[in-house]
Image (cartoon, helix red, strand yellow):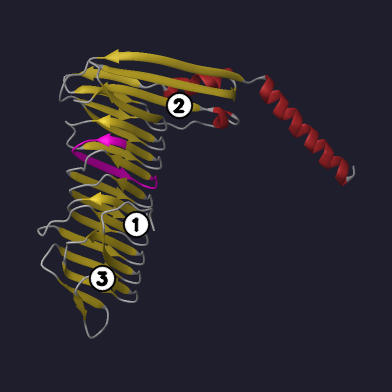
């Protein structure tokens, strides 16, 4: 048998296998909405594995939980098994509501991976506290949660989106991006990630960010900041910065760009080993040329970079795109 003929036969066999797979494939789906009572101060805890979770606060009495599952391109048995394993178990007690999806291997689903959709939609009163965890599912939270101290969002690789308000927001992730828009400054904002970037608009009175390589962009700040990163870029902009505030930034090679209100004159140190320093504020450079000592009477700055550029400048309070 010639090589060309063998290739044509192999190609025909592949087409036949795909056609047979489609012929034996089915579609399975689940759309279910449930209502649960929840009172002021209770928590809504979600452990959703790979499901996308969308949470919204509303003027409602209880919590409404909608499960949407759909998969196509797999056998009837595999489709039913996938839906069963992704259907959440919901329980309610004196502490609040718990929604859990048992983690587990999906097995070989073939084309089903391309068509699978799994989403959990939650509408809840704002006087309750969401606590959301996923492995790979994205998390989206919208609304005002004034009782959440803090509001917890956790994911391994999913993206995080928050738009609304809460006194305290606590985010933990491995590599997912975090996009935060708050309608009023957080009293406390905490984020820890390995490589995911963070974008915060709306500010915080106290912000703590710990990341290995993700970029950090925080805007409309109004208080103390602690940032630790390895290679990510850092851009911080303040609307307000009182004299008793403290700003600590440590990075290995990422660029640091700090913009403070015009009237602020910080004190402290800007230090680099192999990078450069540029400052518009009063200060002096040491003999080694690696440290600028700021000679103000305002907030204390301690900014260190091994090889990244450090820029400190005053500016009219404004909004800007990330560096």
Q: Tally the marks.
A: 3
Q: CA distance from mark 3 to mark 2?
A: 51 Å
Query: x, y percentage for residue 167?
Result: 18, 38
Position above or below: 193 against 247: above
Which circle's residue, 3 or 2, is located before the other in the chain? 2
Q: Which residue position is annotated with label 1? A: 212
Q: For marks 3 and 1, give the one nearer the viewer.
A: 3
Residue linked to disc 3: 280
Closer to the N terminus: mark 3 or mark 1?
A: 1
Q: Residue at x 19, y 33 (%)?
A: 148
What is the CA distance from the residue labelled 3 to the residue labelled 1?
A: 29 Å
Mark 3 neighbour class, 10 Å CA radius: few under 14, some 14 to 19, many 20 or more: few
Residue that numbered label 2 is attached to: 118
Question: Is 27 positioned to the left or the right of 259 in the image?
Answer: right
Q: Residues within 10 Å of mark 2 (few under 14, many from 20)?
A: many
Measure how far apart labels 1 and 2 are at the Cα level.
Answer: 30 Å
Tell me the tag on residue 310.
none
Assign the C terminus to one quadrant of the image: bottom left
| Span colored in magenta | 163-177
């Amino acid at each position: 048998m010639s090589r060309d003929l063998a290739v044509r036969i192999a190609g025909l066999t592949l087409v036949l296998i795909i056609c047979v797979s489609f012929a034996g494939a089915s579609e399975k789906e689940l759309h279910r909405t449930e209502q649960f009572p929840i009172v002021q101060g209770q928590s809504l805890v979600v452990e959703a594995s790979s499901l996308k979770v969308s949470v919204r606060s509303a003027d409602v009495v209880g919590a409404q939980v909608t499960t949407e599952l759909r998969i196509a391109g797999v056998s009837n048995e595999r489709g039913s098994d996938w839906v069963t394993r992704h259907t959440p178990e919901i329980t309610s007690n004196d502490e609040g509501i718990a929604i859990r999806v048992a983690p587990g291997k999906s097995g070989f689903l073939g084309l089903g991976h391309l068509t699978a959709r799994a989403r959990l939609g939650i509408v809840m009163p704002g006087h309750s506290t969401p606590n959301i965890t996923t492995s790979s599912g994205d998390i989206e939270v919208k609304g005002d949660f004034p009782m959440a101290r803090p509001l917890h969002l956790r994911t391994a690789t999913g993206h995080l989106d928050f738009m609304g308000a809460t006194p305290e927001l606590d985010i933990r992730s491995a590599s997912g991006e975090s996009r935060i828009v708050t309608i009023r400054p957080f009293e406390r904002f905490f984020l820890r990630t390995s490589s995911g970037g963070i974008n915060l608009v709306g500010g915080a009175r106290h912000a703590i960010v710990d990341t290995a390589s993700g970029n950090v962009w925080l805007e409309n700040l109004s208080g103390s900041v602690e940032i630790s990163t390895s290679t990510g870029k850092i851009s911080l902009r303040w609307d307000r910065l009182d004299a008793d505030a403290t700003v600590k930034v440590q990075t290995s090679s990422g660029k640091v760009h700090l913009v403070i209100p015009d009237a602020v004159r910080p004190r402290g140190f800007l230090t680099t080993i192999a990078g450069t320093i540029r400052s518009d504020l009063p200060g002096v450079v040491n003999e080694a040329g690696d440290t600028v000592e700021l000679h103000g009477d305002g907030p204390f700055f301690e900014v260190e970079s091994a090889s990244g550029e450090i820029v400190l400048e005053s500016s009219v309070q404004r909004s800007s795109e990330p560096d």
